[in-house]
Amino acid sequence: MTSHQNLRDTSIENKAPFQGIAFNNSYARLPEQFHARVDPTPVAQPALIRLNHALARELKLNVDALNSTEGIEMLAGNRPAAGAEPIAMAYAGHQFANWVPQLGDGRALLLGEVIDRDGRRRDIQLKGSGPTPFSRGGDGRSSIGPVVREYLASEAMAALGIPATRALAAIATGEDVLRNNPEPGGILVRVADSHVRVGTFEYFARKGDPASVRTLADYVISRHYPELSDHDQCYLEFFGQVIERQAFLVSEWMRVGFIHGVMNTDNTSVVGETIDFGPFGYIDEFHPATVYSSIDRRGRYAFNQQPGIAHWNLARLGECLLPLLDDNADAALEQANEALKTFEGRFEKHFHAVLRAKLGLAETRGGDIELAEDLLSLMTDQRADMTLTFRRLGEIDAESSAADGPVRELFDDPAGFDAWVARWRERLGAETRCEAARRQAMRKTNPAFVLRNHLAQQAVDAAIERLDFGPMHQLAKVLARPYDDQPGNADYAQPPRPEERVTKTFCGT
Ligand code: AMP
Ligand code: MG
C-alpha cells in the first residue's frame, strides 16, 4: 500500500456533510479550556476493515449509510459529519507515577455524542485522525496494528460482560505511518460512555483552577451519575461511586486474567470503563506478577498490582476534588481519605465473589478464599494455564475423579492438583445448589476464549504484513461468544505453542 499513487481529492471542504448520525453534543458546550476545536486530517484512501453492526444498531445508526462511500469517508475523517463538532479533549495525567501536566487527545478527536436506543449518551471518537494541539510532536496517526488490537480487545471485553469502551469501526487509511518501520495506517472509531479520565480532573486541579474542576465534576455527575445531583454531598458521593466502579472493574479484569498494562491516571475512566487498550495482555500460564508491557520494566502494572494501582489513581482523583468537598482543607482531606479507605473493602468484596464464582461456590463458607488462593498458588508453581484450568474445572464431576484428566493434565505435578481437588469436592458437598446449575454458572464466569496475546499478534501480523484482515474477522467472531464451547474453534482456546508465545506487548503508538 502506498499513499503516493493516489490522486484522489482528499479535501473535505467541498464535500456534502454525511447526514447519517443524529449528534447531540454536550462536551463541546463546556468552556474553551476543556478542548481544542480541530477537524480531522483527511487520509489518502479510506477503506473499511470492519464495521460493528450490532453496536451501530445500538447507537441507532444506519448500517447501510455507514457502509456507503460517504459513510466510510466520514468515519475516516474525509467528509464532515452533519452535527459533529470535532474536539480534542484536554487532559493531563500521571504516567508511571510521573506527573505530566499536559497530555490531551493527541491523535484522537471526539466527533460528538449520540443518544443510544436505551437513552444513554455515548461518545463517538476517531482515534488516529491526525494531529491536534495536544500532539506534542506526534503524528496524530495510528498504525493498523493497534487499531486491530483495540478493536478486538474492546469487543472481546464487552462480550465478556466487562465495562469497556467499544469499537464501532476500523478503517485503513491507505497511508503509511512511520514507526520503527513504515506500517499501514488505521483509524479506530471508538465509542465510550465517557472519555473523561482521572487525568482530566488533574489537568485543571493542578493548574490551580478549582472552578473548572467543579464545572467538570458537575458535568460528569449530571451525565453519568444523575442520581447524585441532589445529594447534599454530591462530590463526595461521586468520588465514592468512582471508587466503587474501579474496584469492580479491576476485580473483573482479574477474573479473566487481563492485565491493562498502562494504568496511568490518563487511562483511568471516571465511569469505570476499561479504556486505552495499549500493551495489555491476558495471562496464559498463571503467575500473579505477570507483566507483558515492554515499557513496564519494574512491573508497576503487573497483574497483581492492579488493585493497588487503581487505589493510587483514585487518590489522585481525590486530591483534585478536595476544594469541592469542604471549605475547610482538613475536613476535606478527612472526607476524601475516609472515602478512599473504602477501596480495599470494596475490591475485596468483588474479588472474593469472583473467586467463589470461579470455583462454582454459590454459598459463603469459611476457608473458601483460602481454597481459591491455594489453587492459584498451585497454578503458579506448576505454570497451569489460567483460562483452561478454570474452564475445565467447571466440567469435572463433583462426586468422582474419573473425568479429572483434562484439568489434571494442565499441572506438571498432578498429585498437587489431586490433593487440592479433593478439598474442592468436599467443599462442593456443602453446597445446596444442584450440580447442573453449578456447572452452568461456572461456564458463565470462566470463559473458554480470551484474547490471548498470540492470537492478537497473529491478527495484527496478518494485517500489517499482508493487509489480510481474515484472521481478525475470524477471531472477532470467536471472541463474541467467549462463554460458549464452539467445538469448531477449539484451537482458539489453546495456549500458545512455544514458537507462538508473545512475552512482550507494545504501546498503541
Ligand atoms: P496513550 O499511550 O494512548 O495513553 O497516549 C498517551 C498520550 O500520547 C496521549 O496524550 C496521546 O494522545 C498521545 N499520543 C500517543 N500517540 C500519539 C501520536 N501518534 N501522535 C500524537 N499524540 C500521540
Ligand atoms: Mg491514553
Image: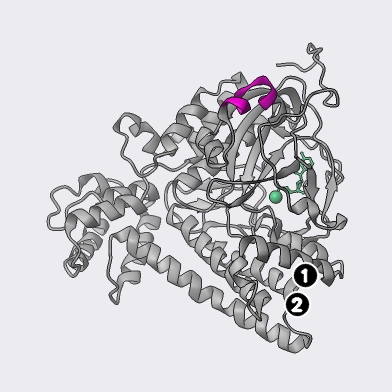
Q: Nearer the viewer, residue 336 or 308?
A: 336
User: Relative to 375, is 75 on the left or the right?
Assistant: right
In the picture of the structure, the residue carrying the numbered disc 1 is: 214
Please name the amino acid that badge 2 sits on: Leu
Packing grade of label 1 (10 A; few <14, some 14-19, many >=20) is: some
Packing grade of label 2 (10 A; few <14, some 14-19, many >=20) is: some
Against 344, is 497 above or below?
A: above
Label 2 residue SS: helix
**Which image quadrant: the C terminus?**
top right
Which quarter is ligand 1 in? top right
Please name the amino acid that badge 1 sits on: Arg
Q: Is residue 502 visible?
A: no
Q: Is mark 1 within 8 Å of ligand 1?
A: no
Give the main secondary structure of the magenta stretch.
Answer: helix
Q: Quadrant of residue 468?
A: top right
Q: Are marks 1 and 2 in contact (CB under 8 Å)?
A: yes
Q: Is residue 165 visible?
A: yes
The picture places residue 110, in percent across and down from the top left corner, at: 73, 44
The region drawn magenta spans: 64-72
In the picture of the structure, the residue carrying the numbered disc 2 is: 324
User: Relative to 315, is 214 on the left or the right?
Assistant: right
1 or 2: tag closer to the N-terminus: 1
Q: Which mark is residue 495?
A: none
Q: Residue at x 50, y 51 (%)?
A: 258
The picture places residue 471, in percent across and down from the top left corner, at: 49, 26
Q: Quadrant of residue 430?
A: bottom left
Q: Nearer the viewer, residue 137 or 273?
A: 273
Residue 140 among those drawn in magenta: no
